[in-house]
């Protein structure tokens, strides 16, 4: 590097090419694992013997109303991937049976769902389920 006006200027003639950068970036150091290999290892741990959902069992995308989002936060209900899939599957089953305004009960919480709009309307955590009255419900499904 040369110094001009107290700035360091790199020697441009020795910069690596894009190909060299890519090869260096993609080369694993000794003892380092590939992220892709880690994902493959994780997927190989999944128990494929568990029943898999059929596309007909799972309805369209589930929406969460603003009111339901507030209730989820207030009541510390985590709507994780497993819970979300239970809701999705429940909406598909309820739609098939003619449900419109339904109660979905899981191990974590109870959700009032507008089946026609694929929307979670409100949520009640497991600890407070006993004290609540659910009105204007035409169907209920247990997704334990």
Image: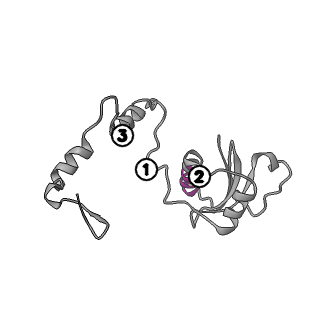
- Taking depth in this image into account, of 124 and 97 the one nearest to the observer is 124
Mark closer to the chain start, 2 or 1: 1
Say whether residue 99 is left or right of residue 36.
right
Give the residue at mark 3. 35
Q: CA separation, marks 1 and 3? A: 29 Å
Which residue is found at the position 62% from the left and 52% from the top? Answer: 79
Residue at disc 3, secondary structure:
helix
Q: Is residue 25 above or below residue 10?
A: above
Q: Left or right of 8: which side holds 136? A: right
Q: Which residues are drawn in magenta?
A: 87-96
Per the image, the residue denoted by label 1 is 55
Dividing the picture into quadrants, the one containing residue 13 is bottom left
Mark 2 or mark 3, which is nearer to you?
3
Say few, some or many: other residues with alpha carbon within 10 Å of mark 1 (under 14 / 14 to 19 / 20 or more).
few
- Give the foreground label among 2 and 1: 2
Question: x, y (%) of residue 137?
Answer: 72, 60
Q: CA distance from mark 2 to mark 1?
A: 14 Å
> Where residue 108 sits in the image (x, y, percent)?
69, 45
Q: From this view, report whether residue 69 is shown above or below residue 83.
A: below
Q: Residue placed farthest to the bottom in the image?
A: 5
Residue 87 numbered tag: 2
Disc assigned to residue 144: none
**CA–CA distance in space, label 2 to label 3:** 31 Å
Proximity of marks 1 and 3: CB atoms separated by less than 8 Å? no
């Amino acid at each position: 590097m040369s110094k001009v006006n107290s700035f360091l200027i790199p020697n441009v003639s020795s910069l690596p090419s894009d190909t060299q950068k890519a090869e260096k970036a993609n080369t694993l150091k000794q003892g380092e694992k590939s992220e892709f290999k880690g994902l493959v290892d994780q997927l190989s741990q999944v128990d494929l013997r568990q029943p898999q959902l059929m596309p007909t069992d799972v309805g369209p995308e589930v929406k969460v109303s603003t009111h339901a989002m507030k209730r989820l936060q207030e009541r510390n209900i985590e709507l994780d991937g497993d819970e979300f899939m239970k809701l999705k599957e429940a909406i598909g089953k309820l739609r098939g049976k003619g449900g419109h305004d339904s109660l979905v009960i899981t191990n974590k919480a109870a959700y009032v769902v507008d089946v026609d709009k694929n929307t979670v309307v409100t949520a009640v955590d497991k600890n407070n389920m006993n004290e609540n009255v659910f009105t204007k419900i035409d169907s209920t499904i247990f997704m334990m």
